[in-house]
């Protein structure tokens, strides 16, 4: 599941030589909102993410990272059972 990568978000802005203030003014947000996105305290909605990607001249995917969400307890148990079965067949 793709998630916003705060490190990539900040790096893209810095690579373009833009300040948070300039970004905020460019997309109609506040400095604090941009800072919250870059610190991971807030997640930009889709339309804002697209605006940031356009401003930074990158693909939306470049601002995301692939992470697997944590498994629930039932998913971990099921995985363990599958691994046990697979291990027994080797």
Image (spheres, rainbow, N blue to C red):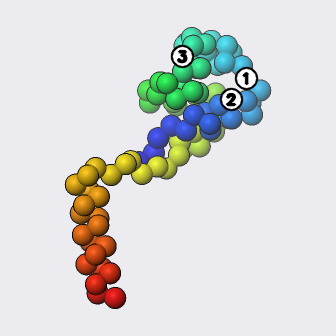
In the displayed structure, 80 sits above or below 39; it is below
* Number of callouts: 3
Helix, strand or loop status at disc 2: helix
Percent across and percent down for residue 3 are: 47, 41
In the displayed structure, 75 sits above or below 17; it is below
The single residue placed furthest to the right in the displayed view is: 17
**Is 57 positioned to the left or the right of 75 in the image?**
right
The residue identified by callout 3 is: 33
The residue identified by callout 1 is: 18
Residue lying at 54% horizontally and 16% vertically, measured from the top left: 33
Percent across and percent down for residue 14 are: 73, 30
Quadrant in the picture for residue 26: top right
Of the residues under marks 2 and 1, which one precedes in the sequence? Answer: 2
Q: CA distance from mark 1 to mark 3?
A: 15 Å
Of the residues under marks 1 and 3, which one precedes in the sequence? Answer: 1
Marks 1 and 2: in contact by CB < 8 Å? yes
Q: CA distance from mark 2 to mark 3?
A: 14 Å
Of the residues under marks 2 and 3, which one precedes in the sequence? Answer: 2
Percent across and percent down for residue 39 are: 57, 27
The single residue placed furthest to the bottom in the displayed view is: 90
Name the foreground residue: 4 vs 55.
Answer: 4
Name the foreground residue: 14 vs 50.
Answer: 14
Residue lying at 61% horizontally and 13% vertically, measured from the top left: 31
Residue lying at 25% horizontally and 78% vertically, measured from the top left: 85
Quadrant in the picture for residue 7: top right
Helix, strand or loop status at disc 1: loop
């Amino acid at each position: 599941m793709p998630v916003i990568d705060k490190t990539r978000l900040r790096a893209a802005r810095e690579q373009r030589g833009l300040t948070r203030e300039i970004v905020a003014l460019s997309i109609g947000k506040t400095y604090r909102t941009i800072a919250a996105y870059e610190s991971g305290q807030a997640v930009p909605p889709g339309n804002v993410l697209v605006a940031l990607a356009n401003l930074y001249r990158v693909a939306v995917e470049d601002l995301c990272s692939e992470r697997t969400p944590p498994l629930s307890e039932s998913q971990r148990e099921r995985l363990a059972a599958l691994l046990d079965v697979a291990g027994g067949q080797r």
